[in-house]
Image (spheres, helix red, strand yellow):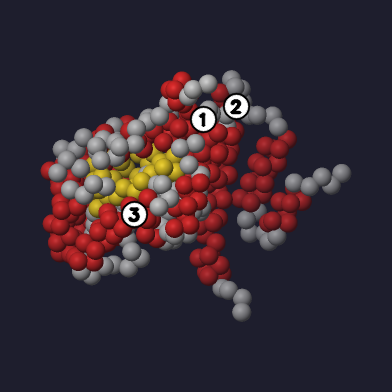
């Protein structure tokens, strides 16, 4: 089955992960800009990083037949330094011209501070100005509800089209409001700290599959790219068809990311494929 | 040297939180399926009663030691 992994921090993973993902049906990954594990000190460090995810990673992924796309942003954990953040933001439009850059993300809140909010707003404004998709990180653990609520409040005062905004890392206690407001939402599947594959399938059963993305958010911390495939297996084990699974794990990311014409992987229908196969 | 209680809590908190969330989600899943089938009231199944008894054991006797041993005995056929 073909899968799109919409949230994947490839620079923290090995080529072997690409190989295993290719073997499990992953046809594309999208890499949001991420925290390096330490706070970067210079705008140039971010610029080099943006070059890495927009130039080097597509070539590495292509060796395994996987298309690699990315997002650029100052992530929430580094938004506490407004001077540095504004300097980086000034350079981001250069990257919107790159053939695999899909938008601005991850932005949003980590500790829901004033500085984070200032940089979040600045990046949303720039995304609107340059007609970019927006990917929003919501905080971890005990800060998640507060940060998600503040995210929605900030966005409600800005001229965003909710259909072009993806609010990520939602769980049972934060999914309802963003969905009802018309945004896309994402589940991030982690071994311990965030949503599990089983709980993700529960939410798909409760909320349907429209405007929902599922991703493993593989990164340099305790994480596993294959929590996404575990979710596919869990979904199928509950009796849903391959086409149902394709709708969620391939077609939904194709629909959301495909709002940027650079993302050229289209939704697929099994019946259509079967009709075209010579007998 | 044995870890301090706080060190153990630091190490175990997220895993314990995860286990509780998985348990809550599993019980919700059973309830939803039961509702979907048109069931009314509690599902009458001895395994569910054992799970509920185990949860009560943990919450009502949280100060007592050997929780895992007591739960395993609860789940054992001692006939």
Circles 3 and 1 on the same subunit: yes
**Residue at the (38%, 41%) spot, across then down:** A186
Name the residue beneath numbered marker 1: A242
Name the residue beneath numbered marker 3: A59
Instruction: Report x, y in % for residue B29.
Output: 56, 34
Helix, strand or loop under label 3: helix
Q: Quadrant of residue A10?
A: bottom left
**Residue at the (53%, 35%) spot, across then down:** A235
Q: Residue furthest front?
A: A278
Instruction: Report x, y in % for residue A140.
Output: 38, 53
Instruction: Report x, y in % for residue A48.
Output: 24, 63
Q: Are marks 2 and 3 in contact (CB under 8 Å)?
A: no
- Which mark's residue is nearer the viewer, 3 or 1? 3
Q: Disc 2 sits on a residue from what chain?
A: B
Tell me the crowding category of disc 1: few under 14, some 14 to 19, or many 20 or more residues within 10 angstroms, Cα based: some
**Residue at the (53%, 65%) spot, across then down:** B11
Instruction: Report x, y in % for residue A277.
Output: 48, 24
Q: In the rendering, which numbered label is found on residue B34?
A: 2
- Which mark's residue is nearer the viewer, 2 or 3? 3
Could you tell whether A35 is left or right of A119 in the image? Answer: right
Helix, strand or loop under label 2: helix
Tell me the crowding category of disc 3: few under 14, some 14 to 19, or many 20 or more residues within 10 angstroms, Cα based: some
Label 2 and label 1: CA atoms lie apart by 25 Å
Helix, strand or loop under label 1: helix
């Amino acid at each position: 089955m073909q899968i799109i992994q919409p949230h994947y921090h490839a620079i923290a993973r090995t080529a072997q992960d690409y190989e295993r993902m290719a073997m499990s049906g992953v046809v594309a990954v999208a890499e949001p800009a991420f925290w390096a594990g330490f706070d970067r000190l210079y705008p140039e460090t971010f610029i080099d990083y943006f070059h890495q995810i927009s130039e080097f990673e597509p070539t590495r992924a292509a060796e395994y037949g996987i298309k690699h796309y990315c997002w650029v942003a100052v992530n929430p954990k580094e938004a506490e330094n407004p001077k540095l953040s504004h300097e980086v933001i000034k350079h981001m439009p250069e990257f919107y011209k790159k053939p695999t850059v899909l938008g601005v993300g991850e932005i949003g809140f980590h500790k829901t501070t004033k500085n984070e909010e200032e940089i979040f707003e600045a990046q949303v404004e720039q995304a609107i100005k340059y007609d970019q998709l927006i990917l929003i990180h919501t905080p971890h653990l005990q800060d998640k509800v507060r940060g998600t609520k503040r995210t929605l409040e900030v966005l409600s005062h800005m001229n965003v089209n909710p259909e072009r905004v993806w609010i990520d890392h939602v769980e049972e206690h934060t999914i309802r409001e963003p969905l009802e407001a018309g945004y896309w939402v994402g589940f991030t599947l982690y071994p311990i700290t965030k949503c599990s594959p089983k709980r993700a399938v529960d939410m798909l059963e409760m909320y349907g599959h429209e405007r929902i993305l599922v991703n493993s958010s593989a990164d340099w911390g305790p994480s596993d790219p294959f929590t996404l495939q575990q979710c596919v297996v869990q979904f199928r084990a509950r009796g849903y068809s391959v086409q149902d699974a394709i709708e969620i794990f391939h077609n939904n990311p194709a629909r959301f990311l495909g709002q940027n014409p650079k993302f050229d992987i289209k939704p697929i229908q099994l019946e259509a494929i079967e009709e075209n196969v010579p007998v | 040297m044995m870890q301090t209680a706080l060190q153990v809590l630091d190490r175990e908190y997220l895993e314990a939180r995860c286990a509780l969330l998985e348990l809550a989600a599993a019980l919700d899943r059973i309830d939803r399926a039961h509702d979907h089938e048109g069931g009314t009231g509690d599902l009458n199944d001895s395994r569910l009663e054992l799970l509920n008894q185990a949860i009560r054991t943990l919450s009502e006797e949280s100060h007592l030691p050997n929780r895992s041993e007591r739960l395993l005995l609860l789940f054992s056929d001692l006939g």
